[in-house]
Image (cartoon, helix red, strand yellow):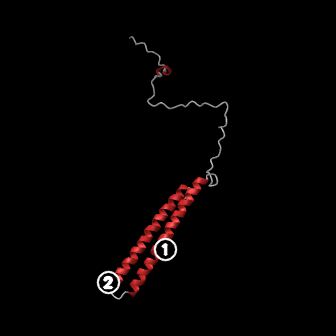
Amino acid sequence: MRTPYARPVDLASAHRRLTMAPAVTLWHPEIVLATSITAPPARRAVALAEPASRPEALVTQLGTTRSVLATLADARRALGPAAAEAHRRAEEAASTRERVSATIAAYRAEAALDDVLSGAWRRMSALMEERGLR
């Protein structure tokens, strides 16, 4: 009887290495170290100009402020007595109709004064924003 030749089993050679590209490649950064570090050039500190540095801007702002204050004073002189007179008329009115018309006149004078005040407030707020105060 003839037996087939049995090859010796070599387990070590049965494992073959497959050369396959991986599905995911990790990033390997190249790190470069500086040989010398130089300081950045020195910069001058930024400073806001004070009013003494720019008197023309200060003169303009003072003029605008004086204008706003003058407008408020004129409105107070004109509308304050008108509102007070309307309130006095409302208190001394003999009929309901006179009382209502005097009260409406007082409200109109006060509304006009409120409009002047809110306009002055907007102008002063704009001046403050220009100066960086708001």
- Label count reads 2
- Outermost residue on the bottom side: it is 94
Q: Is residue 19 left or right of residue 94?
A: right
Residue visible at 65% across and 44% down? 44
Badge 2 marks a residue whose secondary structure is helix
Q: Amino acid at mark 2?
A: Arg
Q: Earlier in the sequence, mark 2 or mark 1?
A: 1
- Of residues 7 and 14, the one drawn nearer to the viewer in this rendering: 14
Residue visible at 55% across and 60% down? 63
Whole-percent x and y of residue 125? 51, 61
Q: Which mark is residue 57?
A: none
Circles 2 and 1 in contact, beta carbons < 8 Å:
no
Vertical placement of 47 versus 31: above or below? below
Residue visible at 46% across and 76% down? 80
- Of residues 56 and 42, the one drawn nearer to the viewer in this rendering: 56
Classed neighbour count for the residue bearing mark 1: other residues with Cα under 10 Å, few (<14), some (14–19), many (≥20): few
Whole-percent x and y of residue 129? 53, 57
Q: Amino acid at mark 1?
A: Arg
- Outermost residue on the top side: it is 2
Whole-percent x and y of residue 10? 49, 19
Vertical placement of 48 versus 74: above or below? above
Q: Which residue is mark 2?
A: 97
Whole-percent x and y of residue 34? 64, 31
Which image quadrant is residue 91 in?
bottom left
Which image quadrant is residue 24 in?
top left
Q: Is residue 70 left or right of residue 105?
A: right
Q: What is the CA distance from the residue labelled 2 to the residue labelled 1?
A: 28 Å
Badge 1 marks a residue whose secondary structure is helix
Q: Which residue is mark 1?
A: 77
Residue visible at 64% across and 54% down? 52
Classed neighbour count for the residue bearing mark 2: other residues with Cα under 10 Å, few (<14), some (14–19), many (≥20): few
Q: Nearer the viewer, mark 2 or mark 1?
A: 1
